């Protein structure tokens, strides 16, 4: 009978693999540099004269759009390319445990990148008196959004042995889920579509749920949305890999 601790072993193996190459450090530096540039230069953080992190969290979905697919494109594609996926799946470990280990390792890696932005919080607290509750909600929304993007990347990585194709597929899916709730897109549909259709399209988007949480409103429906997408992508990945395993 497979040992439940095997998922932890996969988690440790996968997380360790991130830091065994310079790619992880390049990713972390790129993430911090890009977020810092967008927050301080593009959003004119200091010129606003407000002690909050709304400009900082505003850019997270768009930064994740580029960097999370890059961090997850090799989760399964590299295993298939090198042929180690057959070895992994013949070990005394279930496919679900392998999926859990890989998913949480990638999610923790992205969460680490988010946590390393804490100097921005310190800077904001030094300059004024920000609402720390709203800031914590912003980080919660960011981590949930990152986990959802990771689940998308895991699915696309299981569909191909080519990491570049996995990256492009993940980017396209995440972009569609972002744009579905973007105001210009919903405004376009509002001109000719009924309200229920516009609401249905927006409901599939990351944006409304992320925006709600980052503004300090923690609604169980928003948490449920992110959890539902992650669970759906998880089981879709399971189906894809199970089919390839039995083929």
Image (cartoon, grey):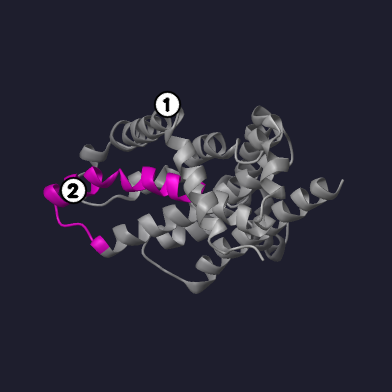
The answer to which image quadrant residue 80 occupies is top right
Q: Which residue is pictured at 77% across the width and 49% down the height? A: 240
The answer to whether 165 is drawn above or below residue 5 in the figure is above
Residue 71 spot, x, y in % from top left:
52, 37
Q: Which residue is pictured at 69% across the width and 42% down the height? A: 87
Write down the residue under mark 2. Answer: 122
User: Which residue appears farthest toward the bottom when viewing the image?
Assistant: 220
**Mark 2 packing: few (<14 Cα in 10 Å), some, or many (20+)?**
few
Q: Which quadrant, please, contains the N terminus?
A: bottom right
Q: Which residue is pictured at 20% across the width and 57% down the height? A: 130
Residue 192 visible in the shown view: no
Q: Which residue is pictured at 56% across the width and 57% down the height? A: 6
Q: Which mark is residue 22?
A: 1
In the rendered structure, does residue 196 fall within the stretch colored magenta?
Answer: no
Looking at the magenta stretch, what is its main secondary structure?
helix
Dot 2: element: helix
What's the magenta region?
A: 106-132
The answer to whether 105 is drawn above or below residue 32 in the figure is below
């Amino acid at each position: 009978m497979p040992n439940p601790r095997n998922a932890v072993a996969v988690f440790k193996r996968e997380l360790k693999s991130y830091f065994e190459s310079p790619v992880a450090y390049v990713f972390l530096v790129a993430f911090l540099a890009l977020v810092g540039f967008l927050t301080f230069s593009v959003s004119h953080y200091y010129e606003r004269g407000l002690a909050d992190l709304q400009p900082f969290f505003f850019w997270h979905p768009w930064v994740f759009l580029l960097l999370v697919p890059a961090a997850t494109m090799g989760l399964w594609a590299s295993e298939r390319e090198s042929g180690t996926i057959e070895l992994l799946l013949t070990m005394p470990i279930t496919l679900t445990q392998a999926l859990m280990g890989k998913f949480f390792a990638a999610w923790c890696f992205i969460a680490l990148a988010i946590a390393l932005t804490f100097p921005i919080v310190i800077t904001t607290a030094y300059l004024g008196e920000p609402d720390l509750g709203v800031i914590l909600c912003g980080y919660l929304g960011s981590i949930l959004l990152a986990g959802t993007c990771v689940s998308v990347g895991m699915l696309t990585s299981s569909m191909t042995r080519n990491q570049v194709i996995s990256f492009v597929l993940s980017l396209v899916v995440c972009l569609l889920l972002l744009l579905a709730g973007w105001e210009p897109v919903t405004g376009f549909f509002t001109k000719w579509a009924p309200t229920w259709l516009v609401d249905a399209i927006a409901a599939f988007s990351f944006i409304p749920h992320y925006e709600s949480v980052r503004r300090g409103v923690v609604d169980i429906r928003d948490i449920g949305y992110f959890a539902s997408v992650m669970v759906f992508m998880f089981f879709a990945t399971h189906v894809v890999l199970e089919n390839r395993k039995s083929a």
